[in-house]
Image (spheres, coloured by chain):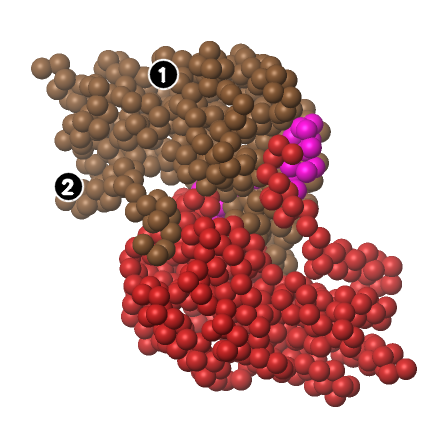
Chain colours: A brown, B red
Amino acid sequence: MDYNKSAYELGSKRSIIREIFEYSKIRANEIGADKVFDFSLGNPSVEPPKEVTDTLIELLKTQSPTALHGYTSAQGDFSCRDKIAKNLNDRFNLCLSADNIYMTCGAAASLSISLKALVNDGDECIVFAPFFTEYRVFVNNAGAKLVVSEPEDKTFQVNIEDFEKKINKNTKAVIINSPNNPSGVVYTEETIVKLTNVLKKKSKEFGRPIYLISDEPYRELIFSGEKFPFIMNYYDDSIVCYSFSKSLSLPGERIGYIAVNPNMNCSKEIYLAVCGAGRSLGYVCAPSLFQRVVANNLDAKVNLGAYKENRDLIYNGLTEMGYECVKPDGAFYLFVKALEDDAYKFFERAKEYELLVVPCDDFGVKGYVRIAYCVDKKRIENSLPSFKKLIDSYKK
Amino acid sequence: MDYNKSAYELGSKRSIIREIFEYSKIRANEIGADKVFDFSLGNPSVEPPKEVTDTLIELLKTQSPTALHGYTSAQGDFSCRDKIAKNLNDRFNLCLSADNIYMTCGAAASLSISLKALVNDGDECIVFAPFFTEYRVFVNNAGAKLVVSEPEDKTFQVNIEDFEKKINKNTKAVIINSPNNPSGVVYTEETIVKLTNVLKKKSKEFGRPIYLISDEPYRELIFSGEKFPFIMNYYDDSIVCYSFSKSLSLPGERIGYIAVNPNMNCSKEIYLAVCGAGRSLGYVCAPSLFQRVVANNLDAKVNLGAYKENRDLIYNGLTEMGYECVKPDGAFYLFVKALEDDAYKFFERAKEYELLVVPCDDFGVKGYVRIAYCVDKKRIENSLPSFKKLIDSYKK
């Protein structure tokens, strides 16, 4: 093979979500889209806030198009970064400036750039199961080894004992993702305090920081009303990776940011490393029109109530039938225990009832499936009788 | 240093263009923007075609925002890829399909993804001086070594003899860039035929293909009216990297594509390697709204006449004074021989006359400066007396 083998393998790798997506389209043609209950994709179903479209049209009608669509500086338009910094300061009592913010092409870019800036060949990076499958790709691309820490049974909070065991001299970074994809679990303040205490202890022991990367594209999708424990208030050596994909329902527009904690060791140098990492991966600047759009809509939010209604409908519906799952306080996923050991077999059986769910072995937890409830409410309502038939079929 | 050293070095590296940009702002405050003749940046000055803004507003007013801003598939919206393939087929007599097109976040992404898909650690990649400075970054990030081939004197076409000498067993890929940044030179059909003949001979000798990557963001900016020799018609093992940044004046929106030649060895596998490389670098999909915008405006073009007027004005003006430069047939750059051996010293001297030009040592050719004439015509007109004073100062 003359071309790059690992790129080819990654590109041709079987993706269960993609396969379900293709199957779903074919099946919808066969029996009608309303009879296929596809819960596989994390594509937001709730419309972007009206302000987003209004801002877009206003900008297009009033601003010079060469300025609007021109390059911004590599780290992003100053005014946009400044507004984001101030907004975060107001909400979470921080002291960020524009020079701590680096605009990105979405959460995946935020994460791959942050990892490339922080880790070196041979380093280890700890993630907590269940974890978003692409973490493995980005960690490996940065030259590091992915180490998986097991979760607490049932709650899917961090298992502190296991976490501490997984840390060693090679541990350079730790990624958390709360609200979590695929479990919908939000880490409690207690979890964050315990986790960062371990990191502080170990950093001291090693005489160098272990970096904490908080991947939080679902930060604005929390139903409990509880205060979100913003990581920079608990741990200095931290970087926040954000995306507006879910909070403004703009996943295709690829717009997000990296916030580098101004209190971290070598904060300025790490910000420069972020700039360099972005440059080396081929990022020139984040999409310019949408930098302006998000800067003008930092307090706008999608209709969270719609997701909460969906959450209640499917969580209550399924648990009443006897399904076992943790109540998700955020994001738009339900993490359901399969009714047999092999999640793939359960997935196949669910398919017979036209229920399309994602087996979660690749997310680092066996025996579970993910239900993405970011769909039309009707789909959930209509699917419930099928979920009932599915569980009954296991009782025979 | 605990974080990544090479990312830090890249991020903190002195960038002459950035420095000039900062200086230009300060100087404009001191003496007035109209008195500073800044020719440093390749940011298009000609407005996007009106159709672009019209399409944007039309889409925003008529389409479902969840569909418009939602994820497309990783390789891009099918209809967008299909239209691009058909448009290229019509114009250049090819047989591309949607499955040969991969939408990207602009030219830098196209190039970094292509390199990552094609090369392996230890491979060599040949570029032709003068070359866009970021090639070095992307080639190194893909794990390969950059090898520079010297140009023909004065014409800055490919020096075939030197090129052939630079090819060896480790040569995996070759990048061409025509119309060229920074010289403005368009490779003649004769150059392309000679260059691809060498590649065919060497590929045969080695029993494996040497890949040819054509980076052509300036393809639509050609003034001569001559037919552009599209690389796929001359060489099978080729990939085209494109961006709409210049043809539609949308550099900040980060929208472009990779076209994989359907006739290349393992074309399907290489397309998959492109998909995998994009995934590993953190690209999820190209910005979705602008995928639709470009798909609907494939025949739209910025006002090329404005750039041609600028080209004629500055080229004629400078050569009449005695400056030495090749007449650029494309892009929006003039490559001017410095009036002393050291281009940096010449740059400093030009600065005394408020002329901001870019010394081109980093572009692989010493003793030259780049003048980006993608500026308001007035700036060129007003700068000419200063260029005259500058050359006169060397005659004293």
Which mark is nearer the camera, 1 or 2? 1
As drawn, which residue projects farthest toward the right? B396
Q: Which of the chains bears the disc numbered 1?
A: A
Q: Chain of mark 2?
A: A
Please determine if labels 1 and 2 lie on a single subunit: yes
Q: x%, y% of residue A206?
A: 61, 20
Furthest-left residue in this view? A396
Which residues are the magenta region?
Answer: A248-272
Q: Position of residue B393 (x, y in %)?
A: 87, 79
Amino acid type, callout 2: Ile
Callout 2 crowding tier (Cα within 10 Å): few <14, some 14–19, many ≥20: few
On screen, residue B74 versus residue B382, left or right, reads left
For this orientation, the residue located farthest to the bottom is B320
The answer to which image quadrant residue B343 occupies is bottom right
Determine crowd level at label 1: few under 14, some 14-19, many 20+ residues with C-alpha closer than 10 A: some
Q: Quadrant of residue B344?
A: bottom right
Secondary element at image label 2 = helix
Identify the residue under disc 2.
Answer: A31
Q: Residue at x 61, y 16 (%)?
A: A205
B15 above or below A273? below
Judge whether B323 appears above or below A128 on screen: below
Closer to the camera in the image, A304 or A149: A149
Looking at marks 1 and 2 on the same chain, the residue that comes earlier in the sequence is marked by 2
Mark drawn on residue B207:
none
The residue indicated by pointer 1 is A326
Q: Is residue B197 above or below residue B131?
A: below
